[in-house]
Image: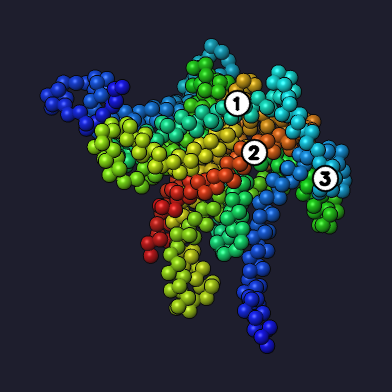
Amino acid sequence: MGLTKMLSLRLPRPRKLLRSVLIYFLAISVMVLFLAPIIWLVISSITPLTQLLTVPLKWIPERPSFEYYKQIIMAAPKAKTTASNFKIAVMNSVVIAGAVTIVCLFVGSLAAYAFTRLDMPFGDKLIFLLLFTQMIPGIAIMIPLYLIASRLNMLDRRITLVIVYCSFSLPFVIWMMRGYFQTIPSELEDAAMIDGCSRVSALFRVVIPLSTPGLFATGIFSFLAAWNEFLLALVMTQSLGSKTMPVALAEFIGRFRVDYGLMCTVGVIACIPPIALTLIFQRYLIEGLTAGAVKA
Amino acid sequence: MKELTAERVRVPATVRKEMTFFERIRTGRLTKRQFGILLCLPAFLMMLAVLGYPLAYSVYITFHKMNIARAGLGPQFVGLKNYARVFERADFWRAFLRSSLFVVYDLFVGMPMGLAIAILLNQRFRFRGMTRATILLPYVLSGTVLGLIWKWIYNPNHGALNALFHQLGLISEYIPWLAQPSRALHMLILVNLWQGTPWAIIMYLAGLQTIPLELYDAAKVDGASAWQTLFRVTLPLMAPITLAMLVLKTVWTFQVFDIVWVLTRGGPASATQVVSYYIYYSSFFQLKLGYAAAMSYVLLGIILVLVFIYYRLIRHEVEY
């Protein structure tokens, strides 16, 4: 009697148990659905080629090898092999995406501050205009941008992509940072200014440090957007000096004969920054994703 | 160090009138509004140069034959010919319909699926946070990488999809997934759904969390069943976020380009030429810049009309 009573206390009722089993089952299926392709990419990159091409396919490599990773990491920059070219493209992407993030956050925060605190002429209308720019498909300004850049001799240069990506992200950055600045009570700045701070130093010493989460959330988006962008990079770059990772990747996949193992390794390396950022800054990322839409 | 101060330095009104804007920047005597304009200047100059000017210049392009391949021959005015061509030729509209199919699947399969999964992940269970983070991964990856992943999975001879289906006994022979026109288009749509649904899940999850728990308690007290609660409480409250998502999804999906470029390059036989691919193809393979620019304007116009319709539709829904 005592035992059954104890058991019935410990065990959930059958209906509840069924429910939680169902939830776990469905949640795991969803995870598998969205993760399996990425995991398969990683497995393919460490499986020796001969084993990768066997029919019927074996799903788990018997002897994992990191040969391809070594090949890419050790590639001499001037070797002109696929691996070395890809390495250069990754470096270009790092430089471009990094520069975009810094410039965007700086320039965007200044503008966002003006919109929140300094009585801007047509403030509301300009903010609405910023939202409108998000509706413009990149393809619509691809042609004029190409023509303008070619006339200014700006094609095939990294700085061009930095400027272009910055302008693409700026509306979002201004919109987001404005939201964060609004949450900071203006009394804090007033206090700083009474204590002898100028408005500029109040901005940099009070407002910006207080909106670090916002800077993170916004910065990640600018970085990812620049890291992943393909169409304009394809149009605007040509040589190794400025080609970004996605362009190099697409070129590599487009070849007639592809070394599948190397292809998958290249894919994994291209995934590392976005995946690392997502897992580390998950909270900020989700905040940034949903901030605009949920409030509205 | 000279700093730009607004209120701190008191300037007599007479002096203020005599100084020009640039003098004030130099001497650091700016009104609040002037200082605001100064702070906005870099951002707005950039956006004007990269978004505003090109958009305006594009209007000029649509009325011209650009002749970029023939040096020395400048742009030639052709009036409305480029627009006429967009409306006369079936090519653009075929590409537009293909893209629309992507949008339809996104809105009618991807978003409901996203909501269903969001409701699932909103239940209490262990590892919930981890599940949410990992689900976001397909969304943050570059389209070219997704293309690579799926090109490898769809590979006719060594791909995982064929191997899996064969080992499960679902197919007796390996299928070339991307070789047949209609199938290739649907395989691309599948990739697009796989990439887009995580975003919908995260958005809906955030939306679900804004619903006050008291509403659910009230429904329970009133004796509502789980389905009734879903349809009468949860879904109506998701209307505003659904509007925002409809708009963004439509805008984004008409821009799908990377996965098409990597997986099929518009083939087989132009079966997967979606609208952005077709515009790219017309500009940089056929060098018909005027025609392509006209197409992109027509596309922008259609998108704006759709966005307007969504606003109208949902506004009605919410205000009952």
Hey, which residue is sitting farthest bottom in the picture?
A: A1
- For the point 76% across and 31% down, which residue is it? A70
Residue at mark 1 to residue at mark 3: CA–CA distance: 33 Å
On the image, the x and y values in percent for residue B122 come to: 55, 61
- Which residue was labeled with disc 1? A92
- Which residue was labeled with disc 3? A61
Marked residue nearer the N-terminal end (1 or 3): 3
Is circle 1 on the same chain as circle 3? yes
- For the point 63% across and 69% down, which residue is it? A20
- For the point 55% across and 28% down, which residue is it? A96
Determine the secondary structure under disc 3.
Answer: loop
Tag 1: amino acid: Asn
On the image, the x and y values in percent for residue A246 come to: 63, 32
- Which residue was labeled with disc 2? A272
Say which quarter of the image contains residue B55: top left
Residue at mark 1 to residue at mark 2: CA–CA distance: 15 Å
Residue at mark 2 to residue at mark 3: CA–CA distance: 21 Å
Q: Residues within 10 Å of mark 1 (few under 14, many from 20)?
A: many
Hey, which residue is sitting farthest front in the picture?
A: A2
Q: Residues within 10 Å of mark 3 (few under 14, many from 20)?
A: some
Question: Against B164, is B283 above or below?
Answer: above
Q: Chain of mark 1?
A: A
Marked residue nearer the N-terminal end (1 or 2): 1
